[in-house]
Amino acid sequence: MLRTTRAAFVTLASIGSVVLAQLPAAAQTQTWIRQFGSAGDEVCLAAAADGLGGVFTGGFVFGSLGGPSAGSSDAWLARHDGLGSQLWVRQLGTFSSESVASAAGDGSGGVYVCGNTGGSLGGTSAGQSDAWLARYDAAGAQLWVRQFGTTAVDAAHAAAPDGSGGVYLSGFTGGILGGPSAGARDAWLARYDAAGNRLWIRQLGTNSDDYAYGAALDGSGGVYVSGETRGSLGGPSAGEWDAWLARYDAAGNPQWTRQLGSSTDDFCRGAASDGSGGVTVGGTTQGSLGGPSAGSADVWLARYDGAGNQQMLEQYGGPGDERAWSVASDGAGGAYASGQSHGAFGGPLTGALEAWVGHFDGAGNTVWIAEVATSEFDYGYAVAPDGSGGVYAGGATDGDLGGASAGGRDAWLARYDSGCPAPATYCTAKTNSLGCTPAIGSAGLPSAGSGSGFVLSCLHVINNKPGLFLYTDGGRAAVPFAGGLRCIGAPVRRSIPLLSGGNPPPNDCSGVYAIDMNAFAVGALGGSPHPFLTVVGTVVDGQFWGRDNGFSPPDNATLSNGLEWTICP
């Protein structure tokens, strides 16, 4: 007999947003690649997960991609589902030049995009070039657009969700945008709410040139912002261009600034949360920043904790010229990055210039690097986690990369999985006393060391009833049990007590059992998890059990179908 107690129940509400966590990859497989464009040139510069397994992308176009061309170059925004099907594409512009430089999910299925415009895109032009920010819903409808700038050149280069439905932006200005000008060009950081109201803006710089190209949430409502400087912004200048990183709280108060560089040029083009309150930044160096120089330019990544202490600094490259243009979080302390290479970086050189996408763990070790290449010029500019342990990457190609060229330079988008088998359901669930059939499901990927991000759930169970998750490394089974089938082999092991929740009495089928097995595996939820849950390669089978007093003992139980998965790194 299975027994539960009233203590330490886990409900779906207590799991929260962890279902969207991303896990590290053991290997990579290109799931699909798509190429799209017009008779002109198209480039993909931005990517952001849509929260449903798909992706938003954006960039610029010199033709008609999602509508008639408005001017010189227009901005574009598209959404693809997880299978690579384009759901919609939008084009926006003025008589001048526009581009989407960055994208960030809005937390409600929509997206924020930002960039620069030489015209009047969301208001009257203030000067030579203005920054702009727009919000679109999941169906591609524009909710609002804002334009801001000075009489000089201004641009928005990075967007990051603020965790409250709004967005952080960063970029550069040649004028007075968020404070007095410190020099030639200054970096700036701003925060907007979901309705498009600016909450605050800050300007920072030296007596030389300073740019911001990255933004990432700090996990506490604040933000990290990063870029490059020719002056002394967070410490003494080491050479020509140095990388810099700063942290601001939710109200826009600076917390600290760090600067790093070699005796030559060091560029910082991306920032990504590490999932533990810290941040990973990366870019390109022409010197020896995180190790000896391998060629004319190398890729570098650095990781800092919330207090600004450097935890890791690594340099990667071949004998040619390797550059990183984008960095994104893998949700488990590591990072994805993408860029381009003139050498054999992710495989043998097949073209004049190749795109690449890579995965690096939190210690800076290379998990994998893949090239994306034709015999022509190929560029990698954008990267975003897919929400299931894999990654989306995008850029531009002069060849036939994911289909026939539409003309000129085309945009491309590819998806890489984690190399981990997808969890599979099997066996037959027992119909409960109300006539509902429980259904098991999962979100995320099982990881031996991430500590979160693999949520198992069971829908259509009776509300407010105790339950358990049963699991084993003994394989599948179909053994008669409690009027249904025990879908897992022996020995049977148990989770902590669960509670289905749902509507108040009377009984209905609104209950849901849920448990994050990654968190349970490392002891974060209590109980007595078996050590095999953290052994890479272990095949685990599981099934939900719950109380159903509509049946007489010993059959007074709910039994879901079974789920089988493999523990990944």
Image (cartoon, rainbow, N blue to C red):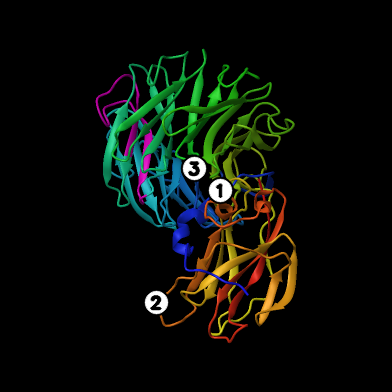
CA separation in Å, label 1 and label 3: 11 Å
Residue denoted by label 3 = 275
- Closer to the camera, 222 or 68? 222
Q: Which residues are magenta?
A: 164-190
186 within the magenta span: yes
- Mark 2: amino acid: Pro
Image spot of residue 412 (x, y percent)? 59, 44
Residue denoted by label 1 = 451
Circle 1 SS class: loop
Image spot of residue 159 (x, y percent)? 41, 41
Relative height, residue 17 to residue 260 (above, below): below
| Quadrant including the N terminus | bottom right
Residue denoted by label 2 = 504
Judge left or right: residue 98 versus residue 282: left
Residue 315 image-quadrant placement: top right
Circle 2 SS class: loop
Image spot of residue 198 (x, y percent)? 27, 43
Sequence-first tag of 2 and 1: 1
